[in-house]
Amino acid sequence: MLKDKINAVKNGDEGKAQFVRFILNGCLAAGIHYGVYFLLQLFLEVNLSYAIGYMVSFLVNFYFTCHFTFRTQPSWQHFIGFSGSHGVNFLLHIVLFWCCMQLGVHRLVAPVIVMGIAMLVQFTILRFVFKKH
């Protein structure tokens, strides 16, 4: 499957290539969030460390979403759209997780379902936000 995605990138299927870059960028953002949190929690209160890690990751994620994922220049319009998509994503996580709990989905399985759905919605929103006019 990953091989198909890499070939799509090589063969010029931009939608699939963007999705692969989106996934890679998301992994990088998660790693930065955790890394900043891990370092700061050695010196600061954990909630503050986690929040700072999120903010740093958010800014790096925005930069790479522009340059790497969608190959555009950062702008205020993109930043507002990117921020809004994260707000929608957060609400979607909360609602879908609650729904899973109400339907009796196991608490360790529910996040996987939620993340899979939310990732696809997030990518769709961001493709619209970063659409080249």
Image: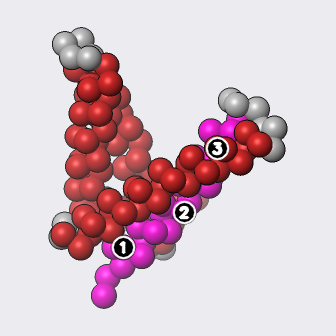
Which residue is more in the foreground, 9 or 93?
93
Residue range (magenta): 109-133
Local secondary structure at mark 2 = helix
Q: Would you say residue 112 sits in the magenta stretch?
A: yes
Q: Residue 8, relative to residue 41: is it above or below? A: below
For the residue carrying disc 3, how many other residues have a C-alpha within 10 Å: few (<14), some (14-19), or many (20+)?
A: many
Q: Residue 60, relative to residue 40: is it above or below? A: below
Tell me if 52 is positioned left or right of 26 in this view.
left
Between disc 2 and disc 3, the foreground one is 3
- Magenta stretch, main secondary structure, is helix
Q: Earlier in the sequence, mark 2 or mark 1?
A: 2
Work out which quarter of the rendered image holds the C terminus and state it. Answer: bottom left
Mark 1 to mark 3: distance in Å? 25 Å
Residue 114 position, x and y percent, is 62, 47
Residue 16 position, x and y percent, is 50, 66
Q: Are marks 1 and 3 in contact (CB under 8 Å)?
A: no
Which residue is label 3 attached to?
A: 97
Which residue is label 2 attached to?
A: 121
Tell me if 43 is positioned left or right of 51 in this view.
left
Residue 95 position, x and y percent, is 61, 51
For the residue carrying disc 2, how many other residues have a C-alpha within 10 Å: few (<14), some (14-19), or many (20+)?
A: some
Tell me if 56 is positioned left or right of 92 in this view.
left
Q: Earlier in the sequence, mark 2 or mark 3?
A: 3
Residue at image position (54%, 62%) is: 121
